[in-house]
Structures are given as structure tokens and as C-alpha cells.
């Protein structure tokens, strides 16, 4: 494993032609598309934003929705024609419950589109694992348990599912060493003293990095921070010990922090929404993963037209141009750091660019 960064807010600058289009008020083809193929899930995680009433994300989601197979292949053709560079399959639900997915991954991979997947890992086997092993750049598994009992408690899972997932990870990392396998470990009260335990186990299973993040338990940042405040000391101690496990093949990505007390946005537009978009299992397109399955985040439906037709339509261009984060996005934003960097770049005075 190299020392190169996997997570960065600077990746957009590798696509200057897209940034030039944005500067000119145009809508480029997205660099990256997130597809939520199904809203069905085999687990019921206590903190899942799509299934808890405490969070706004996914407020309008129907768990019965799945992309029709014909529609999915139409989207694949559009993505290839539009020169989209990467596709991430995520939830909604659990993408590895979507039966056509191996063929979808193969079609995209054979066309040179980079593939990634977010999964709970329970079905990371068989045809799914084979297709991902052949074509995926990275796979990230969401976890919060550290043994069978804790996993079953947190996710309403079968008693032995944690051991099954660890076996799936071990088999996949051995079969597909070129694919970067990470784990997103969600930290809450129940597991905050077991961070070292899970990191040690995951390292021995071939996982290359563990991303540590705080469970979001409320829309209100004060309530969320109050939940995590008593955990901060023990969590920081656990993370420091986990970081001692790092070596050339294993990294800890520490994203555990309290929520910002202010969500002010100092920019008027959202350039990130033109570079990364989300297609839901309901055949609607959304501005970002933070607003998936919400009315305010919906750009429009592709039920009766193709994704390509929709994306380059005047209606979508006007909708994207109308986004005002100062007013519309006074909440946690996954793209905030990206937008800060891109907005500064787009507003540079070209008469002074040579004065580096």
C-alpha cells in the first residue's frame, strides 16, 4: 500500500476541463456518479440515516424501490457515452442485494469506468465478489460491531453474521489484492472502547485502512455533540492506540470529531453538484448524498427520459445554477471542503495567476 492519500478535497483539480465548463456557466458531464440500485437492506442499523426518524436524510425514501434492470443498463450506456470517470454503488439499501449488479459492474469496468462500492459486507461473496475483484478500484465495508454479539445487537443481524463478514473480507482481500479494501467504522456509545479491538482484527483480515467516524444521532448539532462529548477522551485514547498499528499496508483515517457549531457557507453556488451526482433507486437524480431522497435535494426524475438527456437539459442546468448553499445547505455538508477549494479557484483573478 502506498503512502498516497485516498481521501482528499483536491481531487477535482485533476479535471480542469470540467472546472472550465463550470467557470463558463455550463454543466459538464459529472466526473463521478453515485448509484443507489436498491433501497432494500438485510440489516437495520440503529444509526442508519435512511431508516431512523431522528434524521432528515432519506425522509422520502421508499424501501420497496429498486432500479429496473433495463433502466440500469440504459444508465450504464449513458455513463459510458458521457465519459463519466467513476461510479460508486451505495445505499439507500444494500447494493449487493441487487441481483443484476455483477453484470452492471462488468459492463462499466470493461468500458474503463472506475468502480467502487459501499456495503455491509454480508453478501461480499460469489458472483458479486468475482465482479468486484475483477473491476473495482475500492470497496468499503460499513461496520460498528467488534464481535458477533455486538454486531447482532447494532444491526438486528443473525448471531453469526459478524464472523461471516470477517470471513468474506479475508477471502476477498486474498483473491483481489489490487482492490483497496477499507472499513468505515461508525463510533457510538456501545463500541467506543473497542476501536483497537476491531482495528487489530481488520488488519489481520487484509483490510488496508479503517475510516473512523462519529455516528450521527440527531439533525441538531448540539444534541449530536452532547451525545459524543463524554466519549471524546476514551475515543481519542483508543484512536491513538489504533494508530500504533499503522504500517506500510495498514492506515487509520481519523474522521472522528464533533459537528461544527456553525454551518455557514461562504459561497453562492455548489460546483460539487456538477462533478458528483446521485441516482436513486426511485429513478430520481439528487444533488448529493446528503440530500438523497429529500424533496429539496431532488434535481428531477429520469423515469421517462434517459440520464444523459436529463443531465444536459435546460431544466437541470437551471436547477443546478439555482442552488444557493448560503440559504439551502445550512447543515452538515460532505462537499463543503471541496466547494471551498473550487470556489476559491474559480474566483481567481486571471490577471494575477502568474504571480505564484
Image (spheres, grey):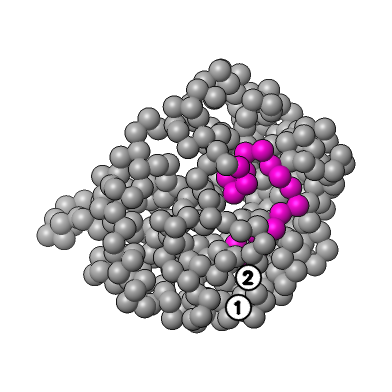
**Element marked by disc 1:** helix
At horizontal 80% and vertical 47% (from top left) the residue drawn is: 165
- Image coordinates of residue 26 in percent, x first then y, are 29, 72
Q: Residue furthest right?
A: 160
Q: Is residue 72 magenta?
A: no
Residue 169 appears left or right of 269? right
Q: Is residue 315 above or below residue 198?
A: below
* Residue at image mark 2: 67
> Mark 2, residues whose alpha carbon is within 10 Å: few (<14), some, or many (≥20)?
many
| Front-lying residue, 52 or 197 | 52
Residue 79, above or below 272: below
Residue found 67% across the figure and 45% down from its top: 142
Residue situated in front as seen by the camera: 302 or 96 = 302
Q: Where is residue 283 shown, x and y percent of the image?
A: 55, 70
Which residues are the magenta region?
36-52
Q: Nearer the viewer, residue 34 or 45?
A: 45
Residue 193 % position (x, y): 68, 23
Q: Which residue is mark 1?
A: 71
- Residue 182, x across and y down, in percent: 65, 47
- Is residue 45 part of the magenta span, yes or no? yes
Is residue 162 at all visible to an observer of this figure? yes
Seen at 48% across and 66% down, the residue is: 285
Horizontal side, residue 337 vs residue 291: left or right? left
Distance in Å between CA atoms under marks 1 and 2: 7 Å
Q: Are marks 1 and 2 in contact (CB under 8 Å)?
A: yes
- The local crowd at label 1, few if under 14, some if 14 to 19, many if 20 or more residues have their Cα within 10 Å, is some
Amino acid at each position: 500500500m502506498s503512502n498516497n492519500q485516498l481521501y482528499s478535497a483536491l481531487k477535482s483539480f485533476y479535471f480542469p476541463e470540467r472546472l472550465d465548463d463550470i467557470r463558463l456557466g455550463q454543466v459538464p458531464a459529472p466526473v463521478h456518479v453515485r448509484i443507489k440500485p436498491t433501497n432494500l437492506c438485510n440489516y437495520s442499523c440503529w444509526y442508519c440515516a435512511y431508516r431512523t426518524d431522528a434524521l432528515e436524510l432519506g425522509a422520502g425514501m421508499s424501501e420497496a424501490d429498486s432500479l429496473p434492470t433495463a433502466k440500469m443498463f440504459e444508465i450504464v450506456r449513458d455513463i459510458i457515452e458521457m465519459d463519466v470517470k467513476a461510479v460508486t454503488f451505495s445505499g439507500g439499501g444494500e447494493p449487493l442485494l441487487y441481483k443484476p449488479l455483477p453484470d452492471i459492474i462488468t459492463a462499466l469496468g470493461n468500458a474503463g469506468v472506475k468502480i467502487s462500492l459501499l456495503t455491509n459486507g454480508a453478501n461480499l461473496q460469489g458472483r458479486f465478489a468475482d465482479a468486484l475483484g475483477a473491476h473495482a478500484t475500492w470497496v468499503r465495508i460499513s461496520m460498528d460491531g467488534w464481535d458477533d454479539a455486538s454486531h447482532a445487537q447494532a444491526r438486528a443481524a443473525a448471531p453469526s453474521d459478524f464472523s461471516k463478514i470477517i470471513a468474506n473480507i479475508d477471502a476477498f482481500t486474498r483473491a483481489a489484492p489490487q482492490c483497496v479494501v477499507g472499513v468505515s467504522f461508525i463510533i457510538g456509545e456501545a463500541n467506543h472502547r473497542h476501536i483497537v479491538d476491531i482495528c487489530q482484527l481488520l488488519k489481520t483480515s487484509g483490510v488496508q485502512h479503517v475510516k473512523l467516524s462519529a455516528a450521527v444521532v440527531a439533525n441538531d448539532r448540539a444534541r449530536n455533540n452532547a451525545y459524543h462529548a463524554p466519549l471524546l477522551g476514551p475515543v481519542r485514547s483508543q484512536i491513538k492506540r489504533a494508530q500504533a498499528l499503522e504500517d506500510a499496508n495498514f492506515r487509520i483515517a481519523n474522521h472522528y470529531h464533533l459537528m461544527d457549531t456553525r454551518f455557514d457557507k461562504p459561497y453562492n453556488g455548489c460546483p460539487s453538484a456538477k462533478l458528483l451526482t446521485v441516482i436513486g433507486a426511485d429513478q430520481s437524480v439528487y444533488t448529493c448524498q446528503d440530500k438523497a431522497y429529500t424533496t429539496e435535494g431532488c434535481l428531477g426524475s429520469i423515469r421517462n427520459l434517459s440520464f444523459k438527456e436529463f443531465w444536459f437539459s435546460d431544466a437541470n442546468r437551471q436547477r443546478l445554477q439555482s442552488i444557493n448553499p448560503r440559504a439551502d445547505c445550512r447543515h452538515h455538508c460532505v462537499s463543503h471542503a471541496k466547494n471551498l477549494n473550487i470556489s476559491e479557484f474559480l474566483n481567481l483573478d486571471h490577471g494575477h495567476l502568474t504571480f505564484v
